[in-house]
């Protein structure tokens, strides 16, 4: 929907998934009309994250911005009759205004599956910020499921949050 919206507004689309990559990896990019500091804040400020990176069943996000620190989206939901905690749990790598790398738990709540990796990479592009999201560590390509489409949605929500086109407006 984000690509369609951008196209209808005269743009060329906001993300271009690479479905030709033979690795079990999702790599998407978007250009956001905001400085890296605002984008990074949208990724690490729990109050801002609650506006764009939460589910209706979520608890408030918790972030301890350091390697090994907590990065909890508060995502909980029922799956196959059991309560599942999903999303992220900890920060694997962080460089302010440059990158944030976290783990990513199995969406079904299967504790036998090893966590995947989610990286948000930020770079300057002509006064704007290019965000590249890399979701990897899948045990098999089939595990990628419909993640590319979900990440398109969340990248669009990140764009709105950082540009101030939805609540909250970042200073």
Image: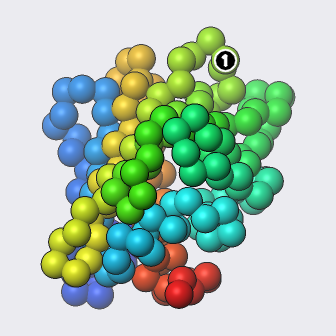
Q: Is residue 14 above or below residue 58?
A: below
Picture quadrant where residue 26 is located: top left
Q: Is residue 101 left or right of residue 130?
A: right
In the rendered image, the quadrant that contains the N terminus is: bottom left
Q: Position of residue 67 (x, y in %)?
A: 52, 39
Please tell me how crowded label 1 is: few (under 14), some (14-19), or many (20+) other residues with Cα within 10 Å. few
Q: Is residue 72 above or below residue 111?
A: below
Between 130 and 8, the one lying in front of the other is 130
Q: Which residue is mark 1?
A: 111
Picture quadrant where residue 169 is located: bottom right
Residue at 68 percent of width and 69 percent of height: 47
Q: Is residue 82 above or below residue 59?
A: above
Q: Position of residue 125 (x, y in %)?
A: 18, 71
Q: Position of residue 14 (x, y in %)?
A: 29, 69
Between 166 and 19, the one lying in front of the other is 166
Tag 1 secondary structure: loop
Between 50 and 63, the one lying in front of the other is 63
């Amino acid at each position: 929907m984000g690509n369609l919206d951008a196209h209808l507004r005269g743009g060329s689309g906001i993300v271009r998934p690479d479905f030709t990559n033979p690795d079990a990896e999702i790599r998407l990019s978007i250009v956001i009309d905001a400085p890296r500091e605002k984008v990074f804040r949208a990724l690490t400020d729990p109050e801002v994250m609650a506006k764009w990176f939460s589910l209706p069943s979520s608890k408030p996000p918790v972030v301890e911005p350091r390697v090994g620190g907590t990065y909890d989206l508060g995502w909980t939901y029922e799956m196959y009759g059991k309560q599942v905690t999903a999303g992220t749990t900890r920060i694997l790598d962080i460089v302010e205004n440059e990158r944030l790398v976290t783990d990513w738990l199995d969406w079904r709540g299967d504790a036998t599956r090893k966590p995947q990796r989610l990286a948000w990479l930020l770079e300057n592009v002509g006064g704007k910020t290019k965000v590249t999201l890399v979701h990897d560590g899948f045990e098999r390509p089939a595990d990628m499921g419909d993640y590319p489409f979900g990440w398109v949605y969340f990248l669009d929500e990140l764009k709105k949050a950082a540009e101030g086109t939805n609540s909250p407006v970042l200073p």
